[in-house]
Amino acid sequence: MKYTVQIVGVGGQGVLLASMVIGNAAMKEGYDVAMSEIHGMAQRGGSVLSTVRFGKGISSPLEPAGGADLLMGFEPAETCRNLGLCNRDTAILMNLEPILPSSVAAGFESYPDVEEIVEAVRKITPRLITINATDLAVKAGKAVAANAVMIGAVAAADGFPIGRDVLLDTLLETVPEKFADINRKAFDLGYEYYNSKEKS
Amino acid sequence: MSDILAKDGKQLLLGNEAIVRGLFEAGVKCSSTYPGTPSSEVGNILETEAEREGMYFEFSTNEKTAMEVAAAAASSGVRSFVFMKHVGLNVAADPMMTLAYSGVRAGMLIMTADDPSCHSSQNEQDNRTYAALSLLPMVEPSTPAEAKDMVPAAYEISEALELPVIFRTTTRVNHARGPVEFGPFRDTASKGRFVKDDPKFVNIPAYSKPNRVRLLDKQKKAMELSERSSLNFVEGEGEVGVITSGVSYTYVKEFVSGVSILKLGFTAPLPEKKIADFVRGKKAVIVVEELEPYLEDAVLRISAQNGLGVPVYGKRSGNFPRQWEYSPEVLSGIATLVKVKDFKKPLQKADIVLPGRPPTLCAGCPHRGTFAATKRAVGSRDVVYCSDIGCYTLGVQAPFRTADFIICMGGGAGAAGGFAQSTDQLPIAFIGDSTFFHSGVQPLMSALFNGHKIKMVIMDNRTTAMTGHQPNPGTGRDFGGIKTDAIDIEKLVKGIGVRFVETVDPYDVKAMNKVMKEAIEFDGVAVVIAKRACPLELKRQKMLVCRRCEVDDGKCIRCYTCLKTIACPALFKDKDGSIEVDPVQCIGCGMCANVCPKGALEVKQ
C-alpha cells in the first residue's frame, strides 16, 4: 500500500501543520513516510504545496502529477489550480473559504465566484467534496481551527489508511494544550461532515 | 513539534533539522553562515539551540567571512561547519579555493544548498562543479535520514584527509521531511590552538606550488576512501545499470524496477574503479542526476578509458533534461530502456480563469512606502532601478515596477555605477540593510571613488527578512553571552564620505518623497536610509502594536490613489467600487492614509 496526500493552500493557513500531523500519524501507524514542502517565499502570501507520502516501500518525497490519492484543498482557487496533481479516482476535499490574492484586492485581477470554481471542478471530476471549514471551526470555538476541521474530514475519507484516533491524538499532541478542546471539537465536526457528505 | 535535542528515538525531521542533529552527533563546535534558502532553517535552529550544546554559531556578514571563520576554527583543531545557499558559495569561493591548498587540522564541512528549479533563487547553478574546481572531496545525501548520518561520516573523511569536505544538498533534501533515527551526541574540543606552520598556512607562491602537489596527492588518497566508502553502494540486480546520486536516487529506487543501482553518496572524487566494475558487462548504463551531466561525463570518460563499450544514457543522449529539478515523471525518458512504473493520467485543467498568487510584499510592509515615494519623486525621468536580493525584489510586480536589473547580492549598487557611466539614465539602487552589510558597502565606496553619481536607497527594515528574520550587523547580536552594539548605517555611510545622507521613515510617504526628490537633485552620490522595522519581525518579537485604518466613505472620491501607489493587500476595492480595509491584515501603518489626497483614510487606535 502506498498513499499520497497533496495539501494545497495559502501561506498562513496551516498547510504545513496539517502535513506534519498526517506525516507523524502515518509514522505511528508503522508506515514509511516521505514528505516535501515548499518554503521560503510562501510566507509572503504565495501558494503553498505540501506532499505527504506514506505506506510500504516509500522513498521519493515527490509524487508524480496525477498520483495523489487525496487532495486536501485549503482554498478554492488553489484547489482548482492543482487538479493536475489528481487523477479520476482522487478524492478532493475543498474548503470553500476564499483568500483573495493581493492582485485581486487591488483590482488588477478578478477572483471568480466560489460557486463557479466548484462547478468548474465538478465538470472535471465527480469526486469533489466541499466543506466550509471556517464556519465549522467557528462553531467549534475559533476560526483558526479550520485546519483541524480539514484533518477531521480527511480522517473520514473513504479508504484513508490512518486510524481516526491516531490522527486525532497526533493533532492534539501538535497544537497548544489550551486549544485542545477546540481542536478536538473541530476535528469531530469535520469528521462528521465528511461522513454525512460521502454517504449522501 | 520536533525535538532535535532528544536523547534518542525516531522523529519526522526536515532535512535541515536532520543536518543540525548530525552536527551535534558529530560534536561540531563552531558554525557560521550567511542566511540563504534552502539552507536558512539550519541557522535559525542553531541560533536557538547551538549554545545549549556548547557550539558556537554566528551569522557572518557574508558567506566569504563565514568561510574564513570556519576555516580558522578547523585550522586550530576545532570541528567547524559553514553553510550557505548555492550562490553563496560563489561569494565564499575565494577563501575555499586556497583553503584546499592549506587543508585543515580538525574536520570541516562546507554545506552548499543548491536550488534546482530556482524555487527561491536567481539561478540553478550546480555546485558539484566546485568540487572539481577546488579538488575538495564531496558527499551528497538523498534523504533527511541520510543527511543526518552523512554529517559525522563526512567529518571522518575530512579528518582522514585533512581537507574540508563539501556537503552538497538540494532543496528536495533540505526541505524534504522523513523519519530520522537519533544517535548519541559526541563531544569534541570547543577551543583549539593554532600551531603555526608557514608552508601549510601561508600561501605565498613559494609554498602554494608544493601545496598544489600535496592537494593532488590528497586526491589520490581521497579516491581510495571513495572506493571503499559505504556511501557508495550497489543494490538490486539487472542487465541495465543505473548510476545516480542525491534525491534522484529516491525516484529511481521507487519507480524503476529490474535494474542494478549504483548509488553514489561520496561523489568527489568519484570511485573510478567501482564505477568501471559496475559498468563492465552491463547491457546499458543510465545516469540519473539533476542539472549538469557531472556523473554522466565522468562515467563516459571512465568507460572510454577502460574500453568498456557500454552505451551510456542520460542528458548527453537526450533522455533527460539538463534544466530544472527532477520529479519521478522524468523517468519516462528511459521507459524504452527499463521498466518504469506507469504514471496515472492527471486530470485536465478546469475551464476557468484563476488569479495568480505570486508572493507579495506584506500588508504594512515599509518597502511599499519606499517604492511609492521613489516613483513619485522620479516622475517622468528615465531611471534604471537596480534592485537586489531580498523582499524588495518583489518590487518587480505591479504597480511598483521598481526592479529593472537583478543579478546577485550587492549587485544593484555595483551595476548602478556602471549604468551611471555607460548611459544617460539615472540609476537608483535599492538594497536591504542585511544585503548592504553583505556586499553593498564596497560598491558604494567604488561609486564614490570613481565619481558615479548613483542614488542608493538602503531599505533598513531592521532584520534579514526574506530568509526568516535573522539578525545582521545593523541590529546587533545576542548569542551565548555575546552582546554587540548595532552598527549605525548612517554613521557608516557618512564615514566613508557620502555627502548626501538622509534617514527617513517610509511610512511617512510624503516625507520620504521629499527626501527622494532632494537625493535625485543632488549632484553626487546620495544615500537615503528608509528606516522602519519589518512588521513580521515585530510580530515575531510580540512588539507589533496593531492599529486599524478606516475609510470614510463620505470623503472617498474613488480615485484609488491608495491602491495604485501602495497596493497594500489589506486594502481592496469592493464590488460597488468602494475602498474597504481587511481588518485581519491591516496593521494600521498609515501609508494609505498618507497618500490619500482627500484624507478619507484614517488610522484608528
Image (spheres, helix red, strand yellow):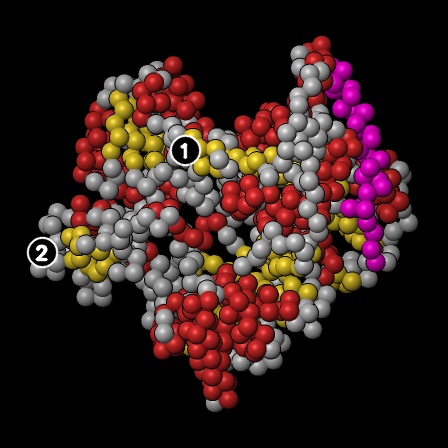
Q: Earlier in the sequence, mark 1 or mark 2?
A: 1
Residue B487 image position (x, y, % from top left): 38, 28
The kind of residue on which mark 1 rests is Gly
Left or right side of B284 for A86: left
Identified by mark 2, the residue type is Lys
User: Residue at horizontal 60%, vertical 69%?
Assistant: A25
Residues rendered magenta in the picture: B208-236
Horizontal placement of B500 versus B111: left or right? left
Indicate whether B317 appears above or below A73. above
Question: In the depicted view, which residue is nearer to us: B434 or B323?
Answer: B434
Residue closer to the observer: B496 or B310:
B496
SS of the residue under disc 2? loop
Q: Which residue is mark 2?
A: B555
Residue B213 is one of the magenta-drawn residues = yes
At a point 74% along the width and 28% down the height, the residue shown is B162
Percent position of residue B550, x then y:
18, 57
Above/below status of A72 relative to B380 = below
Assign the C terminus of chain B to one quadrant of the image.
bottom left
Quickly name the residue at label 1: B476
Magenta span has A45?
no
Residue at the top extreme, as displayed: B206
